[in-house]
Amino acid sequence: MFLSSMSPSVSRIPAPAAKGNTVLEIDTPSLLIDLDAFEANLAAVHQHVIGAGLHVRSHGKAHKCPAIAHRQLAAGALGICCQKTSEAEIFADAGITDILITNQLVGTRKVERAAVLANRVKLGVCVDHALQVDQLGDAATRHGAKISVMIEVDVGLGRCGVSSAEAALMLAAQIGTFSPSLTLGGIHAYTGGAQHLREPAEREAAVAAAVERVTAIKWALETAGFPCPTVTGAGTGTYMLEAASSLYTEVQPGSYVLMDADYAANHLPDGAVPLQHALFGLCTVISASATHAVLDGGLKTFATDHGLPVIQVPGWTVKSLSDEHCVIVPDGAAMPLQVGDKVRLIPGHCDPTVNLHDWLVAIRGEQVEEVWPVLARGALF
């Protein structure tokens, strides 16, 4: 069941639009979801992955929006991923029942909440250290909960994860000591470093190296009597490669339903159809001169870790962002802009941009069809 899009209890910030408004009536700065592009991306990725015999486990960190997660499940996703316990709690409150926390939980409060949550939903958690297993196992035992534990393998990202079969075997044995509260669910192997490699051959080589490493660790675990029914990972930039690997059983794309300027900069293999831009920042021109114009959305509207947003008005370029302003400059053939005009921009990085907003305005054509609360915004712990 989808959440009510306009419930006054979901956010202390009024929604920037209502169903039936035109785009010109939307308050700014705000985020738009182009439903035609969103639905096309959803169908394309799910059909490809499910057709290859794998499961889709969509990553909720990209949109932090239960209304989107429900649509991903309706399109065939097995469940969702979250990065934090607080994210998972919010999605569970919204009726999502299969959640993998693709992160390590450290600290009594986090694992206690995870154990309580595991009595409400099917819950998985990643580990790469003995302390994480001990804390999670103790909490699950106290609460009579059952948690599926995924051993994270570092496949080149240089972030979390074990790097050897020996370390994985030690964790698997430790997980077994907490049976039946903890069970070994398999291996988490996210090729994060490959997602934004620009050339197809670069991404292919990175995923091939990951597959080789994970295959060896999986073989060692299974040979020692530790079944690994699930190998999960992948993302929007590489999901086709993991789907073709004969190793992964599920993939975790997140940005695919939204897209952003950074993902669009990836070069695709021959014959591949690009995903469409579905996420746009909508801003209003609040000042204009012969040399530049100023929009009402700045650093509090757009994340810039992957570059400045890209304006969708011919002849104009984003020059700079400050807290509340975006300065754009024209070239010689720029379409004229006036104070009061509304313009769209493609964010450089969708995930942290969405986390700046309380609402997503879903439009079809030039009309608002729904307004979705970003309920997991700021869920960082």
Image: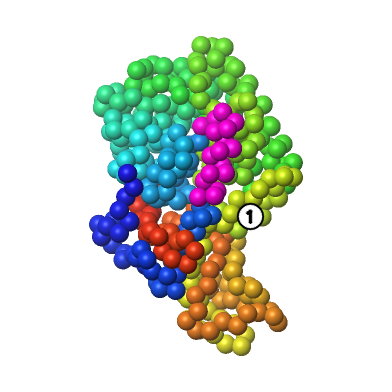
33 relative position to 334: left or right: left
Quadrant of the snapshot with the N terminus: top left
Identify the residue shown where x is 37% and y is 56%.
Answer: 372
Does any portion of residue 322 appear in the rendered image?
Answer: no
The front one of 240 and 2 is 2
Q: Is residue 49 magenta?
A: yes
Q: Residues within 10 Å of mark 1 (few under 14, many from 20)?
A: some
Q: Amino acid at mark 1?
A: Ala
- The residue wearing badge 1 is 264
Looking at the rendered structure, the secondary structure element under dot 1 is helix
When asked about the image quadrant of residue 264, the answer is bottom right
Identify the residue shown where x is 35% and y is 43%.
Answer: 91
370 relative position to 160: left or right: left
Q: Position of residue 44 (x, y in %)?
A: 57, 44
Q: Is residue 17 magenta?
A: no
Identify the residue shown where x is 34% and y is 65%.
Answer: 18
Question: Looking at the magenta stretch, what is its main secondary structure?
Answer: helix
When asked about the image quadrant of residue 26, the answer is bottom left
Q: Position of residue 170 (x, y in %)?
A: 50, 19
When asked about the image quadrant of residue 54, the answer is top right
What scheme was used to colour the molecule? rainbow
270 relative position to 286: left or right: right
The front one of 315 and 173 is 315
Magenta span of residues: 39-55
44 relative position to 12: left or right: right
- Vertical comparison of 66 with 117: above or below: below
Q: Position of residue 351 (x, y in %)?
A: 49, 53
